[in-house]
Amino acid sequence: MAANPLNKLLRPRLPSAAAGIETDAAAVVQLDRSRSGFVVRRAASVRLAEGLIEPSFENQNISDPTELARALAELATGAGLLKQRKWSVCLPEASTRAAILTIEGPTTSRRELEEVFQWKVERSFGAPVSALRLAREQLPQDAKRQTRFLVNALHRDVLAGYEAVLDALGWHVGLILPRHAGESQWLRNGHQGDSLLLTAHDEGFTAVLLRGGSLLALRSVFCEAAECDDELHRFLLFYRDRASSGVESPQIDRLLVIGDQLDKRRVAEIANEALGVRLKPMSAADVGLVVPAGEMDFDAIAAPAGLARMAW
């Protein structure tokens, strides 16, 4: 069947190059598609000066925009992507907020739905809608047939700081998402079971639970490092007791852990304690990404590579 020519207008193709910005590092990736998955074509990472990026949902993140622009320009040059103009970008977890918003009960009109949605946003993120840049995705209805949305929020003032740096580089960025949104793309590959992403950072971790490639639950946990084990155990008990309701013999059978702040072996032990399942954290090869040996750590590029993967 011939492709619909309107698809290019209604669903423009995303770039195969993406950048990831973290508290202490940045990375750029360009992917190619292969028969078995994806191949890193070009990639590079760089350490950022201490204090250059201080992730915050409400306050400016960048202490020296000129220095960040210089670091990103050198990074792109080192990766052979100096002439690349179209990019996707993922930002630190603590710079963004994400939540699943449920609209309880029926709404009589689209206007009423929008009013309820905005009220939910302001209650969840603690800021008026006018102060936020929102990205929302409508999810399948829950067991009670209630309307659900995945919402990613970013303060406009915080976003403006990043956009000023990207504009100075001449980058045209069509997609800006939190780090976990990029990493979760590696679990959206047609698998029919339950998959869990844990993305760790200095302020805690984000847990993303997928069922058959569709988002089932999401929780951002801000805690001290010593509290992560207990918080993860609570989340897995939530999955066992609530997210698995109505499903015969539900079981997480894929686990992706990104970030040095979580010990992968300990995470697997906690999953076994809470759920009675033995899981081996997935590697780049397990998710279908070929990384040239010795050139790049998967954790450093998983988020931007996940956004680059969305080009296909």
Image (tube, rainbow, N blue to C red):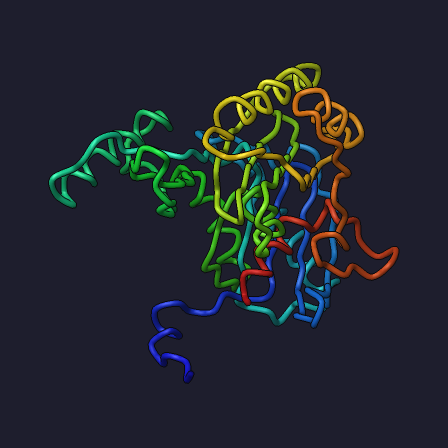
Residue 99: x %, y % from top left: 42, 33
Is residue 109 left or right of 153 when viewed as pictured?
Answer: left
In percent of width and height, residue 100 lies at 40, 35
Q: Quadrant of residue 236?
A: top right
In this view, the residue in front, 182 or 107, is 107
x, y percentage for residue 268? 75, 29
Q: Which residue lies furthest to the left in this view?
A: 108
Residue 221 percent location from the top left of the image: 55, 24
Q: In which quarter of the image is the C terminus?
A: bottom right
Residue under the image location 48 percent in, 24 percent down: 242
| Quadrant of the drawing holding the N terminus | bottom left
Which residue corresponds to the image point at 40% horizontal and 37% vertical from the top-left?
Answer: 155
Q: Choose between 163 and 259: the one closer to the eye.
A: 259
**Above or below 82: residue 114:** above
Rendered residue at 41%/84% (across/down): 2
Q: Is residue 294 left or right of residue 303?
A: right
Placement of 208 over or under 283, stated as above or below: above
Number of numbered discs: 0
The correct choice, above or below, for 160 with respect to 207 in the image is: below
